[in-house]
Image (cartoon, rainbow, N blue to C red):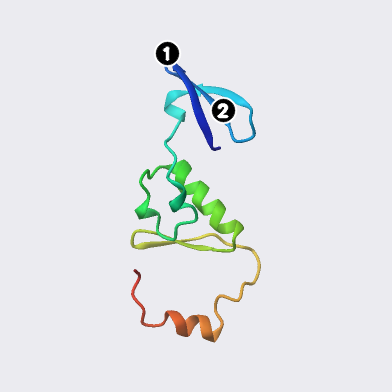
Amino acid sequence: MKGQIQSKDGGMVTVKKEDGNTVTVKESDVHPQNPPKFDKIEDMAMFTFLHEPAVLFNLKERYAAWMIYTYSGLFCVTVNPYKWLPVYDYDVVAAYRGKEKK
């Protein structure tokens, strides 16, 4: 969940969530958020802050936009959409054939 740190005290952090609710959690459970320019980024190796919550959030956001392929450096991470998507049409395949990843 995204939120704004309100205060820190004795290893605990009070966070105001996006929905307006406030929660108090262990400081070790709080991770820095990547800048908005990284929202739905194709290659997660570019993240400023690379950690599990950032990866899961990015995969969730890309999946919601039917972007089922995401890179993490040299590796391609695929989230199964459990439905047919027109990503293997001749035009799409031709557009990627012989191209190097940027």
* Residue 12 placement (x, y as % from top left): 47, 18
Q: Is residue 93 left or right of residue 43?
A: right
Q: Do the CB atoms of the residues marked 1 and 2 lie less than 8 Å apart? A: no
- Write down the quadrant of residue 32 in the picture: top left
Q: Residue at x 36, y 78 (%)?
A: 99
Residue marked by disc 2: 16
Q: Residue at x 56, y 75 (%)?
A: 87
* Residue 40 placement (x, y as % from top left): 49, 56
* Residue 93 placement (x, y as % from top left): 48, 82
Question: In the displayed structure, would residue 81 be above or below residue 11?
Answer: below
Question: Cα distance, mark 1 to mark 2?
Answer: 18 Å
Residue marked by disc 1: 10
- Residue type, mark 1 in image: Gly
- Residue type, mark 2 in image: Lys
Answer few, some or many: residues within 10 Å of disc 1's Cα (few below 14, many 20 plus, some between 14 and 19).
few
Q: Residue at x 37, y 50 (%)?
A: 47
SS of the residue under disc 2: strand
Q: Residue at x 44, y 52 (%)?
A: 37
Name the quadrant of the N terminus.
Answer: top right
User: Considering only order in the chain, which callout, 2 or 1, is on the residue closer to the N terminus?
Assistant: 1
Between 83 and 49, the residue placed more toward the observer is: 49
Foreground: disc 1 or disc 2: 2
Name the quadrant of the C terminus.
Answer: bottom left
